[in-house]
Amino acid sequence: MRDDDTIDDQYAPEGTTGRSDDTPSSVQVGVLRGTAATRSLRTRLGALVNPRRPARVVLATGVVSCLGLATFAGFQAFPADPVTPVGAEAALAERAQPDPASRGHDRTPAPTSAAPASPTASPTASASPTATKKAKPKPKPKPKRIAPVAGLDRMQMDNAVKIVKAGREMGAPRQALVIAVATAMQESKLYNYASGVLPESQNYPHQAIGWDHDSVGLFQQRPSSGWGTVGDLMDPAYATRAFLAVLLEIPGWQDLPLTVAAQAVQVSAFPDAYAQHEWLAAEVVEAVLG
């Protein structure tokens, strides 16, 4: 007899006889090998063995029966390995499978952060072409050009308009503007004169050249008399302000005849010459002021 409880039978066919191919559990092996009853059984069986084959078969059958009893006793002494019922195994197998219904449920995707804008992308690349198109600045309205009146040409009328506008900016009354236009008609025929005596005056915009001493501009004012610099007097607006500043300082100027008032400012050698332009000057001022 061997330690693994297998009985050798020399007359048996090759293989094993009287034992199962199933491997006993660890509990069963421990019970068979560890109990005193098993060791006593082995001793008794060893004494009964004889060389005759029938006795060995009977003995083997008895051994198997005893082993079955010992196994049953081991099951009773020790708790068996937990066995999962068939129904529980099916439930576990079903639980392990993915839930097909859950894949069909509607799910709200998790919010994702917006993709960062490309550093090379233009901030207005997605804007509408009409939104990014800059509106064209409205052209400045051109000043209304007043048609010439009182027999003046275009150049003369433009100079008359400059006189009237400069006087209005000073707050001069209408009568003062008429006196100023009439004086310029007499002094320069409403042309901006440079002086042949003062070559410097020809460096500024001018429309004619005169030779009356150092007199320049629309009012033929002389720099040597303190009216201003050559450059100032060649400017129609400055020359007008210089004339009206003196006129408005004359006491009662608005009650004086036009020729007297003009002569008080200009101190001309021909004091009565201004009177002839009074009605034409009034027509020009009316056309400008409306």
Image: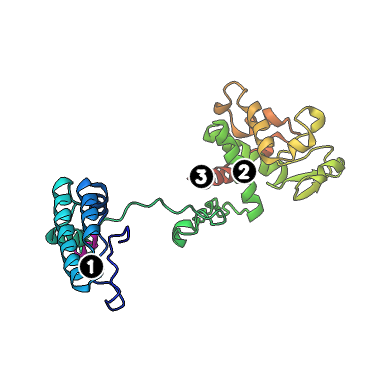
C-alpha separation, residue under disc 1 versus residue under disc 2 = 134 Å
Q: How was the colour assigned to the protein in this rendering?
A: rainbow
Residue 224 lies in quadrant:
top right
Q: Is residue 87 left or right of residue 151?
A: left
From this viewpoint, which residue is outermost toward the top? Answer: 251
Give the structural element (helix, strand or loop) at label 1.
loop
Q: Which mark is residue 20?
A: 1
Foreground residue among 107 and 201: 107
Q: Is residue 153 visible?
A: no
**In the rendered structure, which amino acid carries the disc numbered 3?**
Glu
Horizontally, residue 185 falls left or right of residue 74, namely right
Residue lying farthest to the bottom in this orientation:
13
Q: Earlier in the sequence, mark 1 or mark 3?
A: 1
Magenta run includes residue 95:
no
Query: Mark 2 to mark 3: distance in Å?
Result: 14 Å
Instruction: Specify the label residue 162 is tagged with.
Output: 2
Amino acid of disc 1: Ser
